[in-house]
Image (cartoon, helix red, strand yellow):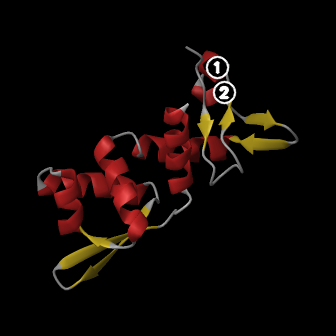
Amino acid sequence: VVSALLVPAMIQACLVFVPDAAQRSYDSLRTVIYGASPIAEQTLRRAAEVFKALGHPSRLAMIAALEGGERCVCDLHEIVEGDLSTVSNHLAVLRHAGLVKSERRGTQVFYTLRLRCILDVLRCVNRFEDC
């Protein structure tokens, strides 16, 4: 298995694989050179936050559901079939990572994708599965 560090499409124009990244300590990553464009440590850390937020199937399902537009928490609750507190915690992780934004209207909270290009990453993974 080749270890790889993925830098998301929304930060770098394409996915970047750094095969030897696992052999370096995370704190020692300053800049990774890909072609002529350096990827700064701050960008790598931000990308790691985003990928960590995507690290649960329920959160991925919510991201996919939001592709069609805004959804209330009750809709997302039905999609992931978890208890409401778990769904709220997943949404908080996505919101903290900057992937979604929320808007309260009366007693309901509606979510929309803030980083729509994350869908390109999911499509990329889907294409990988088809190979």
Q: Nearer the viewer, mark 1 or mark 2?
A: 1
The answer to whether 101 is drawn above or below residue 86 in the figure is below
Tag of residue 123: none
The numbered mark at residue 24 is 1
SS type, badge 2: helix
Q: Quadrant of residue 76?
A: bottom left
* Side (left or right) of 55 relative to 114: left
Q: Residue at x 33, y 41 (%)?
A: 56
Toward the front, the furthest residue is 130
Q: Residues within 10 Å of mark 2 (few under 14, many from 20)?
A: few
| Image quadrant in which the N terminus is located | top right
Picture residue at 42% right of the left edge, 64% below the top: 67
Residue placed under numbered mark 2 in the picture: 28
Position of residue 21 measured from the top left corner of the image (x, y, whole percent)? 64, 23
Determine contact: label 1, label 2, CB under 8 Å: yes
Residue 94 percent coordinates (x, y): 38, 55
Q: Please name whichever residue, 69 or 19, is drawn nearer the observer in this view of the structure.
A: 69
